[in-house]
Image: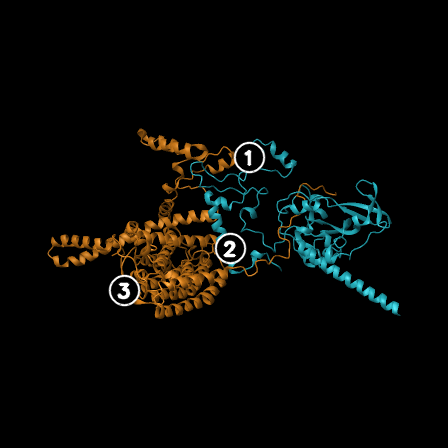
Amino acid sequence: MGDWLRINDWVHEGSLFLANEMMGLTPWPGQAEYLGFFIEKMVLCTLIFGGIMNTMFVILWMERKILGRLMDRRGAITAMRSLWVGENGVTAGAWWDKVPYGLGRPIGALNGFLNRVAGNRDPKHPTVDRVNNRSWHGVWFLFPGFFQNLADGMKFMTKEHMVPSKADKWIYEIAPFLIISSTVVILGFIPFSENFYAINPKLSVLFMMAIFGIAPLGVFFAGWSSNNKYTLLGGIRSAAQLTAYEIPMLIAVLSACILSGTFNLVELVDNQHYAGSWNLFLMPLGAAIFLIAMVAEVERIPFDMPEAEAELVEGWWTEYGGMRWGLMFSAEYMRTYAACFLFTHFFLGGWHAPFQGVIGSIPILGTGYLLIPGITWTLLKAWAVFVIFAWLRAALPRIRTDQILEFGWRYLLPLSIVQLVIVVFMRLYLFDAENLRFGDRGGFAWDGGIGLFLAVPVIVTFIFSVLFVLYSLDEEPGDMVERPFQAQTLEPAGTHKAGE
Amino acid sequence: MPMHKHAKPNFRNLFIKPFWMTLKTALRTFPIIGKRFSNGYHNKKAVMLDAGSMNRVKGSKMNKVGKQEYAADRESSTLVPSIWRPVTIMYPYERLEDMEPWLFVPGNYNGRIGVIWETCTACKLCVKICPNDCLHMTTELRVDVLDSAEGENSGYGGELEVGGYAAVEIEGIADEHSERDPITAHDAPVDEFRFAEVIDLSGSSATVRWNDSGVEEVMEQSDLLVADDQIVSGRIDMGRCMFCGLCMDACNFTSFFMTNEYDGMSGFSRQELWFDASRTRVLVNEHQEAVDAELAHRAKREKEKREKAAARAAKKAEA
């Protein structure tokens, strides 16, 4: 059943074998399983954290690229620039050629070639050319700019650690670790696939949500202890905002748990598949609430009031510098990435392929389709969710604190409760547990209790789509201005002769 | 205050529209898809405003403007044409609201003053309220819209009289004015009318002396429009204007506006900031609804006045 990439099993067997071999050399061979457990968890944590941290580079890279395109602000890519074109047409190839014993010659020649073929030369626009030729734009398979984050990290590492003289030193030092450690703990609970996770307690969803709620405390500590009005304001805003959005988020998660009938993340994902429909199609409203609340929780635009750089310098982390700042900044992205994974698992069926049942039943193609390891789908879905995060950031402006709170308390909270009620009724009356199928193809439990094949997700999605379209229509499309829009005077400046 | 339709804070404008616009922008960056959303501003030769501008830029060695393409090509290399580079918007050849239409000028933006002179009644409320004293009133020869109105509002204007003025619409001018795009046009529209002094009226014909040529001519009265030399005209010193919009608020006749236009208010001397009527003018067809409403209002008043006068005359006759 399922994924052939059974990392957990392999690691379990391997570490047990290793532990047995090692403990066999000692007088206590009976203790091997404890050592095995230790090795297994160490290896798995390393794999999971390594996997998440490394794939997080993609998120950072995507954010720049997607925002650049959404906002039409694509600029020069500077990270790999020194490898390609230098200033004034002096190529880095010339530099490589100077490496002793001609060791750099091949790279120099390659640089020269790339410069000639793909260099940013444009004889039609000499002036523009001079400005734009600061760098070469690269090709996609080289991931130019991908390593900017590593370079940033190196820079932060070498920076001095400074504490404001009147800061509350202990709290000031503890706050970043509170934030970062609690963020990293979330990552440990995120499964990559059915058989690739670090730990999987029975109530993992509950635990994860509880951990998610610790970081705001650290944020408030950081804001308070810096002894700076901007950080304090940022901390207070953060506390108010996170409190307002935590509750609708938890209720939305609760709805998802009710639909899937479990508080365990791995089971929750699998149950979506066994029941035949992703939760997104059963509770679009809840998914939207969860997404909005998550954007607020990770303090991204449009809910980035706590760090509103236009008014609060940099919000609650104004006073931090060096690697502490770097870690807190990366913690923001870790939380964002974790939010993407959570959305994937709660609503997008986690590691299950789209239309797994339908495509999986095609004779040869389907077999190949099912061979794609689940981690591929998890990552692809998480990145796709991040596209929405970036799109939100490009499209929407930052909103005011009172609007944030009003939206959270007066709209999201009641809506989430409505969603909860709907979900309870759906689970009670429209769910048919007999049609659960525990296999690759998935089942069809959402048949409305009367045997209509997957009627519930189709109807629910249709209803919510119609509501969405109705709501987004303009109320008075023909309503035009009373004042002239774009009226223009008749003579341009400079052509008018005074006194005529 | 009426708002631009995109300024209404509803779900569509706050949420759906920004998403669609950013998506469109992102799609534009991939030429294969993006050309369907192209605004047609790229890869065109520069068209100078006028000969003067052309002369100013022609001689420069550093900046051969006449030979360069404005709205420069966004493709950064021939090998990977899908990667574009950012290009500065070449104002005034390109305008921001064309390139990035979500950055529209809001409907309540107080820009350059624009007046529908045809509906101005010279009440001088705007002149009185102007705190900076930048409005001035004169008179000029013009056709009153009420005189030339058609349909249900016709017949309430003035009539030709000896010593007064008449006008004839120049042929084809209506087409020219309707084709004129007020957003991209940089030159003033040509005159609409030829004016003449009425020398004599007899029967259905009139003897007129054309103002432009001084030639006398006998015309059918039905071909002539009534013109008036007492129609108000204004001069506005934009150099003193602080764009408070009080004049617009003071205007009772929907004829005084602060337009959304942010350019065309510069010059090489202070005198050039004296805008006479033609530079502040908003053409009737550019804002037909306001003119129509005003016209109906006036025709109604004129009608009531005439009915009252007729009733009074009837009463008098009875008595």
Circle 2 SS class = helix
Q: In the visual, does A269 lie left or right of A316?
A: left
Under mark 2, the amino acid is Lys
Q: CA distance from mark 1 to mark 3?
A: 69 Å
Check whether the beta carbons of the residues at disc 1 and disc 3 lie within 8 A of each other: no
Circle 1 SS class = loop
Near-viewer residue (B311 or A58):
B311
Q: Which chain is cyan?
A: B
Residue A497: percent from the left, percent from the top?
71, 41
- Marker disc for residue A202: 3
Under mark 3, the amino acid is Lys
Residue wearing tag 2: B17
Near mark 3 (Cα within 10 A), the count class, few <14, some 14-19 or many ≥20, is some
Residue wearing tag 1: B68
Q: Quadrant of residue B51?
A: top right
Residue B206: percent from the left, percent from the top?
84, 47
Under mark 1, the amino acid is Gln
Check whether the beta carbons of the residues at disc 2 and disc 3 lie within 8 A of each other: no
In this view, B271 is above or below A209: above
Q: Which chain is orange?
A: A
